[in-house]
């Protein structure tokens, strides 16, 4: 099996064991541009749930400070948490599916455009 395939798929599968560390190391230390591209994409999809969680907590805190109504704050908090959970689940499955595609993808059919 090609080591580039393994590195590309490992950067996506690392969502299961080391979400940010593995794609970051692969992105920094890989020689191939295609491997770096996939590691950067995986890193982005691993960092986005953390950013969205931070933003949902920030919005929830600001809403509690700015409104006196418990109903409004509760609704906004519930909407933010549900949106965060759905977004995180979608990104998790995206990473798993993308990792499988990298393993079974034939190198001869590569559609990656190098710059």
Image (spheres, helix red, strand yellow):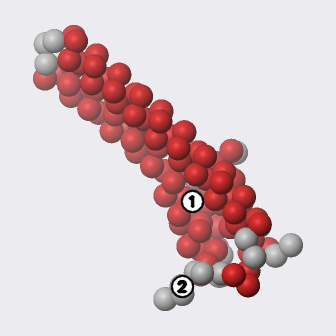
Nearest to the observer: residue 64 or residue 92: 92
Q: Is residue 66 above or below residue 43?
A: above
Q: CA distance from mark 1 to mark 2?
A: 18 Å
Q: Position of residue 16 (x, y in %)?
A: 68, 44
83 on left or right of 35: left
Where the N terminus falls, by quadrant? bottom right
Which image quarter: residue 89?
Answer: top right
The residue at 75%/76% (across/down) is 106
In-image side of 81 versus 109 (left or right): left
Q: Residues within 10 Å of mark 1 (few under 14, many from 20)?
A: many
Secondary structure found at label 1: helix
Report whether residue 22 is seen: no
Mark 1 or mark 2: which comes first in sequence? 1
Could you say where residue 25 lies in the image, as x and y percent from the top left?
63, 64
Q: Which residue is mark 2?
A: 113
Q: In the image, what residue occupies the spot 53% across and 44% down?
A: 90
Rendered view: 74 above or below 91:
above
Front-most of 76 and 11?
76
Callout 1 touching callout 2 (CB < 8 Å):
no
Relative to the observer, which residue lies in front, 48 or 97?
Answer: 97
Q: How many labels were placed on the picture?
A: 2
Which residue matches tag 1? 42
Query: For the point 53% across and 47% down, which residue is it?
Result: 91
Q: Residue 67 appears in which quarter of the rendering?
A: top left
Q: Residue furthest bottom?
A: 115
Residue drawn 64% across the image and 74% down it? 35
Q: Is residue 99 above or below residue 64?
A: below
Q: Tell me which corner region of the image, top left, top right, bottom left or bottom right, holds residue 22.
A: bottom right
Relative image position of residue 47 (x, y in whole percent): 48, 50
Residue 46 seen? yes
Give neighbour class at mark 2: few <14, some 14-19, many 20+ (Cα, 10 Å). few
């Amino acid at each position: 099996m090609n080591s580039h395939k393994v590195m590309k798929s490992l950067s996506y599968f690392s969502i299961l064991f080391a979400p940010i560390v593995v794609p970051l190391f692969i992105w920094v230390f890989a020689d191939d541009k295609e491997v770096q591209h996939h590691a950067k994409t995986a890193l982005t999809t691993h960092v986005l749930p953390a950013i969205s969680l931070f933003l949902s907590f920030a919005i929830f805190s600001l809403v509690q400070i700015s409104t006196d109504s418990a109903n409004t704050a509760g609704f906004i908090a519930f909407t933010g948490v549900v949106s965060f959970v759905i977004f995180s689940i979608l990104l998790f499955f995206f990473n798993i599916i993308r990792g499988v595609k990298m393993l079974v993808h034939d190198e001869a059919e590569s559609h990656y455009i190098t710059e």
